Amino acid sequence: MRSSGFVDDSYYRRLIRELTRFISSAISPRNPNRHVPTDLEIQNQARWILYDCDDPWNQTPADNGNWLKDFKDSISMPKQ
């Protein structure tokens, strides 16, 4: 992915790395509250990662349905 001038590639790499960690933790058999995160949970977590808040006015790539589907497929996220 090329940089648009406003957002560099490290923005996406950080988001993907942190969301992958969040999902791995949520679905871990060692997690007593184990569950498959919903799209809304992933979107809120993305806002915390990038903006340090969960205000829905702060949009992230995870708010794009196609991006979110591609991301979940890329990490082989279990279906809900």
Image (tube, rainbow, N blue to C red):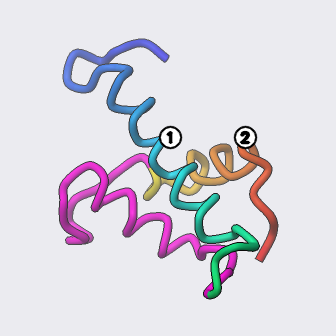
Judged left or right of residue 64, residue 69 is: right
Q: From the viewer's perspective, is residue 1 above or below residue 18?
A: above
Structural crowding at the residue carrying mark 2, measured as other residues with C-alpha within 10 Å and reported as few (<14), some (14–19) or many (≥20): few
Hey, which residue is sitting farthest bottom in the picture?
Answer: 33
Q: Which of the two residues, 39 or 35, is positioned nearer the viewer here?
A: 35
Q: Nearer the viewer, residue 65 or 74?
A: 74
Q: Is residue 48 magenta?
A: yes
Residue at 61% x, 87% y is: 33
User: What residue is disc 2 on?
Assistant: 74
Please name the amino acid that badge 2 sits on.
Answer: Ser
Which residue is label 1 attached to?
A: 16
In the picture as drawn, the residue positioned furthest to the front comes out as 30
Distance, label 1 to label 2, CA atoms, is 10 Å
Q: Earlier in the sequence, mark 1 or mark 2?
A: 1
* Left or right: 43 in relation to 28: left
Q: Which residues are magenta?
A: 33-61
Q: Amino acid at mark 1?
A: Ile
**Residue 27, percent from left and from top:** 69, 70
Determine the residue positioned at 20% across, 71% down. Answer: 55
Residue 42 x/y as whole percent? 49, 65
Vertical position of residue 14 compared to residue 27: above or below: above
User: Residue 78 is drawn in which quadrant?
Assistant: bottom right
| Residue under the point 61% across and 49% down | 66
Residue 10 to residue 44: above or below: above
